[in-house]
Image (tube, grey):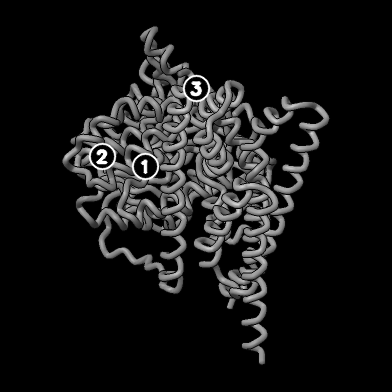
C-alpha cells in the first residue's frame, strides 16, 4: 500500500518534470527555427515616434557603481529633451547620493530623489513607487545601479510601445564580470539560457515573457491604472508581469536591447540572491495562480505558460522530493512501473539544470551567441542546479514559516556590487 | 565521385548508430537503449538544425552513440562486479547514483558537439 502511494507521488512528480522538459524543448526548437529564418534580416533601429521617457535608477549604497551608469546615461542617443533620468537614493549611508547629485548638477535631465531613513529603506518596490510619482515620462524604464546599457537602449526598449496593447517591455541582461570566477561563468550560462532562448521563445510564441524589473520598462498610464508596484512582494517584477497580463496588456521581450550587469561572484551571494528570487516567485505564484487559471484575458497557451512560469521555483523542490521518494521506493522494493519511471530521472535531473533551463537550451543559447569556450562548462551547471534544490526548498520552508508567523518583509534585500571587474567595458 | 563518397559515409554513420542501438538492447539493457534513443532524438531535432555538413553531424551522432554504449557498458559491468563483491546492497547504491551518472555523458558530449560545430557558424557570420 505504501509503495503504491509512493509510486503515484513519484509518477505525479515525473509528469510535472516532463511537462517542463517538453516546454523547454519547444522553446529551443522555436528559437532555432526562427533564427534560421530571420538571421539575414537587419534589425531596424529607426524610431519615428519619440515618446517621453523616464529612467528610474533605484539605488541603495551603490557608490561604487552608480557613477558608471550615470556616465552612460549621459551618452544615450535618445533626445535629452524627451528624457528624464531619476536616481532614487533610497536612504543610502555611503556616497551614492553625492555622486548622483554631482551628475544632476552637470546634466539638466538627471534628477535625484533623496529618501531618508524615515521615508526610504523599505525595499526596491517602495523606492520604485516613490520614483514613479516623481517621474514625468509616458514610458518608464528601470535600471539597477550596477547595469551598463547600450547607448541606443532607450530606442530599442521604447520601440515596442507603439502597440497600445503593450504594457511592459523587457531587454536582455548580459553578464559583465563573466571571467571573474566559476560562479560568474555558470551564472552567465544560466542567463544565456534564460534570455537568449527562453525569453526569446516566449516572445515568438506569443506567450508571457517575464518582466525582470531592470533593463526594461512599462507604460506609465498602465502602471497608474494598476496602482504601482506591490510593496509586499519580494519579486515585484514577476508580480508586475502577471498583474499587467491579467489586466489584458502584453509584455514583450526585446532581445536586441542588451545591458551589461554584474553577476553575483560567490556561492554565498548566489544563495542570497536566488533565495530571494525563489521566495518572491513562490509568493507571486500563490497570489496569481488561480487568477491566471480563470482569467478571461489570457489565451489557453498563455495560461499554460503562465502557470508553468509561476511554478518554476517549485521544480527544484519537486526534483529533490522525487529523488527521495524514488530512493524510498528502491529500499521498499520497486515495481516495474517504477523502474521505467526511474529511467526518466536522469533526464529530468539534467534537463532542468541551470536556473531551471535544460542543458540543451543553454547549449543552443551559447551557440547562437558564439560562446564556444563557455559551452565546455555546461556539464557543471548541474552543480548549480543541485545548489538550487537546497535554496528553493529553504525558500519554500521560509515562506511557510513567514505565513504562519505573519511576518512581512519590506526592506532591501540587495546584492553587493563592486564595479571593478568586467569583460566588456 | 565526391557525391558517392558522401553518400557512403552517411550510410556508414547511420549503420553505426543502428548497430549501437541493437548492441545496447541485446548486450546491455533496455535503459541504455532508451537513453540512446533520447540522445538521438534530441540531437537530430536540435543539433541537426545548426550550421555544418550532415556528415559532420552524423559523425558526431554516431560517436555519441558509441560513447554512450561504452559508458553504459562500463557502469553495468561495475554494477555486476560490485554486486558480486559487496552483495546486493551495491545495486541499491548504484540505483541511487544512477540519475546523476547516467546522463553525464549526454550533457558533456552535447557541449562538445556544439563547440565543434561552432566554427561553421562563426565562419558563416564572418563571411
Label 2: few (<14), some (14–19) or many (≥20) C-alpha neighbours in 10 Å: many
Q: Disc 2 marks which residue?
A: A244
Residue A422 in view of the camera: no
> In terms of depth relative to the viewer, which is nearer, A38 or A105?
A38
Q: Are marks 3 and 1 on the same chain?
A: yes
Q: Quadrant of the N terminus of chain A?
A: top left
Q: Earlier in the sequence, mark 1 or mark 2?
A: 1
Chain for numbered disc 2: A
Mark 3 secondary-structure assignment: helix
Q: Earlier in the sequence, mark 3 or mark 1?
A: 3
Marks 1 and 2 close (CB-CB < 8 Å): yes
Q: How far from the left and from the top, in percent, is residue A140?
A: 31, 43
Q: Does residue A196 appear left or right of residue B105 in this picture? A: left
Residue A294 in view of the camera: yes
Q: Is residue A266 above or below residue A85?
A: above
Chain for numbered disc 1: A
Q: Are marks 3 and 2 on the same chain?
A: yes
In 3D space, how far apart are the residues under numbered discs 3 and 1 (Cα atoms)? 43 Å
Mark 2 secondary-structure assignment: helix
Chain for numbered disc 3: A
- Residue most toward the left? A296
In 3D space, how far apart are the residues under numbered discs 3 and 2 (Cα atoms)? 45 Å
Label 1: few (<14), some (14–19) or many (≥20) C-alpha neighbours in 10 Å: many
Mark 1 secondary-structure assignment: loop
Q: Disc 1 marks which residue?
A: A211
Q: Nearer the viewer, mark 3 or mark 2?
A: 3
Amino acid at each position: 500500500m505504501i509503495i503504491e502511494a509512493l509510486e503515484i507521488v513519484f509518477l505525479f512528480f515525473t509528469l510535472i518534470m516532463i511537462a517542463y522538459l517538453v516546454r523547454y524543448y519547444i522553446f529551443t526548437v522555436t528559437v532555432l527555427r526562427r533564427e534560421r529564418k530571420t538571421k539575414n534580416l537587419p534589425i531596424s533601429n529607426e524610431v519615428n515616434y519619440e515618446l517621453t521617457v523616464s529612467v528610474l535608477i533605484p539605488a541603495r549604497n551603490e557608490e561604487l557603481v552608480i557613477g558608471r551608469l550615470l556616465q552612460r546615461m549621459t551618452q544615450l542617443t535618445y533626445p535629452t529633451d524627451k528624457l528624464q533620468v531619476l536616481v532614487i537614493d533610497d536612504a543610502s549611508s555611503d556616497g551614492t547620493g553625492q555622486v548622483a547629485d554631482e551628475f544632476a548638477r552637470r546634466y539638466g535631465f538627471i534628477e535625484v530623489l533623496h529618501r531618508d531613513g524615515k521615508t526610504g529603506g523599505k525595499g526596491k518596490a517602495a523606492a520604485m513607487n516613490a520614483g514613479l510619482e516623481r517621474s514625468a515620462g509616458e514610458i518608464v524604464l528601470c535600471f539597477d545601479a550596477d547595469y551598463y546599457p547600450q547607448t541606443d537602449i532607450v530606442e530599442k526598449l521604447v520601440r515596442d510601445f507603439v502597440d497600445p496593447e503593450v504594457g511592459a517591455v523587457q531587454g536582455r541582461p548580459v553578464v559583465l564580470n563573466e571571467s571573474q570566477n566559476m560562479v560568474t561563468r555558470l551564472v552567465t550560462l544560466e542567463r544565456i539560457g534564460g534570455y537568449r532562448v527562453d525569453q526569446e521563445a516566449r516572445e515568438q510564441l506569443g506567450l508571457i515573457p517575464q518582466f525582470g524589473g531592470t533593463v526594461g520598462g512599462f507604460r506609465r498610464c498602465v502602471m497608474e491604472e494598476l496602482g504601482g508596484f506591490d510593496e509586499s512582494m519580494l519579486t515585484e517584477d514577476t508580480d508586475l508581469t502577471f498583474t499587467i497580463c491579467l489586466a489584458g496588456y502584453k509584455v514583450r521581450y526585446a532581445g536586441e536591447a542588451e545591458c551589461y550587469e554584474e553577476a553575483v561572484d560567490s556561492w554565498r551571494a548566489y544563495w542570497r540572491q536566488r533565495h530571494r528570487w525563489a521566495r518572491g516567485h513562490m509568493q507571486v505564484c500563490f497570489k496569481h495562480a488561480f487568477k491566471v487559471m480563470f482569467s478571461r484575458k489570457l489565451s489557453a497557451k498563455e495560461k499554460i505558460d503562465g502557470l508553468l512560469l509561476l511554478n518554476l521555483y517549485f521544480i527544484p523542490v519537486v526534483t529533490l522530493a522525487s529523488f527521495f521518494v524514488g530512493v524510498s521506493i528502491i529500499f521498499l522494493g520497486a515495481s516495474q512501473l517504477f523502474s521505467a519511471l526511474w529511467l526518466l530521472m536522469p533526464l529530468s535531473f539534467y534537463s532542468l539544470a541551470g536556473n531551471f533551463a535544460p542543458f540543451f537550451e543553454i547549449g543552443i543559447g551559447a551557440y547562437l551567441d558564439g560562446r564556444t569556450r563557455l559551452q565546455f562548462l555546461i556539464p557543471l551547471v548541474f552543480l548549480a542546479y543541485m545548489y538550487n534544490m537546497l535554496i528553493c526548498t529553504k525558500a519554500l520552508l521560509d515562506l511557510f514559516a513567514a505565513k504562519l508567523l505573519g511576518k512581512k518583509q519590506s526592506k532591501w534585500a540587495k546584492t553587493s556590487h563592486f564595479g571593478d571587474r568586467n569583460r566588456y567595458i | 565521385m565526391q557525391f558517392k563518397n558522401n553518400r557512403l559515409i552517411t550510410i556508414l554513420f547511420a549503420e553505426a548508430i543502428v548497430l549501437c542501438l541493437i548492441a545496447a538492447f541485446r548486450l546491455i539493457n533496455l535503459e541504455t537503449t532508451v537513453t540512446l534513443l533520447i540522445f538521438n532524438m534530441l540531437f537530430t531535432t536540435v543539433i541537426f538544425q545548426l550550421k555544418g555538413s550532415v556528415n559532420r553531424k552524423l559523425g558526431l551522432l554516431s560517436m555519441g552513440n558509441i560513447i554512450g554504449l561504452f559508458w553504459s557498458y562500463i557502469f553495468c559491468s561495475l554494477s555486476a562486479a560490485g554486486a558480486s563483491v559487496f552483495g546486493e546492497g551495491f545495486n541499491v547504491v548504484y540505483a541511487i547514483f544512477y540519475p546523476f551518472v547516467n546522463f553525464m555523458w549526454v550533457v558533456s558530449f552535447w557541449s562538445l558537439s556544439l563547440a565543434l560545430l561552432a566554427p561553421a557558424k562563426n565562419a558563416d557570420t564572418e563571411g
